[in-house]
Image (cartoon, rainbow, N blue to C red):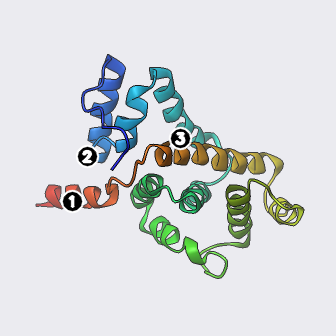
Amino acid sequence: MAYLPAVERPKGLVKRITYRVLRRVFGVVPTGTMVFTARMPVAFMTFLSRTYRLDKKLQLDSETVSIVRQQVASINMCTACIDIGRYFGLKESAATLTRLDALADYRTSPLFSEAERAALDYAGELTATKAVSAETFARLALHYSEREICDLVWLVASEHLANLANIGLGVGSDGLCELSQQRRLQKAS
């Protein structure tokens, strides 16, 4: 249960349209939107939506983006972000969802490459300690270009922002994966 009540009927045309679009995409308006962004100026909503659209401009592949974001959300224990990461992973492919489910064992799982292990170690260390050892960075630099390393920093920082907004307001999982499966079953019948 979030600390602030959800804004069911937002003020302003842009926010009402955003709610409509989110209902169409997810089947519900995510609680984080109704608790946080509904109370903020429209520019914040625009910034947050652009954050995830910027992922498409990264030089990293979408699988790496997904697993790094999920790693950060898991370390921060942001159930809302874990849920939405799994929702998009499910939309991407069954293989992506399998890899997200295997993240706890990424160091030994054959589902992850050495490059991905280096990226996950880097993201995990940066998230947990707010610092990165020279050894971790050197291992990362063996697999990624300077630009790709900057992309990884962006992923950790932007995911951390979303995590803290949700955690700070007591926003948890909306069960988006379950809702998505229910919607698919309803369409099939």
Q: Are marks 2 and 1 in contact (CB under 8 Å)?
A: yes
Three-letter code, disc 1: Gln
Image quadrant containing the C terminus: bottom left
> Quadrant of residue 118 in the image?
bottom right
Q: Residues within 10 Å of mark 2 (few under 14, many from 20)?
A: some
Figure disc tally: 3
Q: Residues within 10 Å of mark 3 (few under 14, many from 20)?
A: few
Q: Residues within 10 Å of mark 1 (few under 14, many from 20)?
A: few
What residue is shown at x 83% (from left), y 48% (from top)?
146
Residue linked to disc 3: 52
What residue is shown at x 30% (from left), y 40% (from top)?
29
* Label 2 residue SS: loop
Residue linked to disc 2: 27
Three-letter code, disc 2: Gly
Q: Is residue 159 above or below residue 133?
A: above
Q: Is residue 172 left or right of residue 76?
A: left
Gap in Å between the C-alphas at discs 3 and 1? 25 Å
Name of the residue lying farthest toward the front: 3
Three-letter code, disc 3: Tyr
What residue is shown at x 85% (from left), y 63% (from top)?
142
> Quadrant of residue 24 in the image?
top left
Q: Earlier in the sequence, mark 2 or mark 1?
A: 2
Numbered badge on residue 182: 1
State the image coordinates of residue 103 (x, y, percent, origin top left): 56, 71
Q: Is residue 27 left or right of residue 39?
A: left
Q: Are marks 3 and 1 in contact (CB under 8 Å)?
A: no
Q: Is residue 31 above or below residue 179?
A: above
Q: Name the foreground residue: 9 vs 186.
A: 9
What residue is shown at x 36% (from left), y 21% (from top)?
14
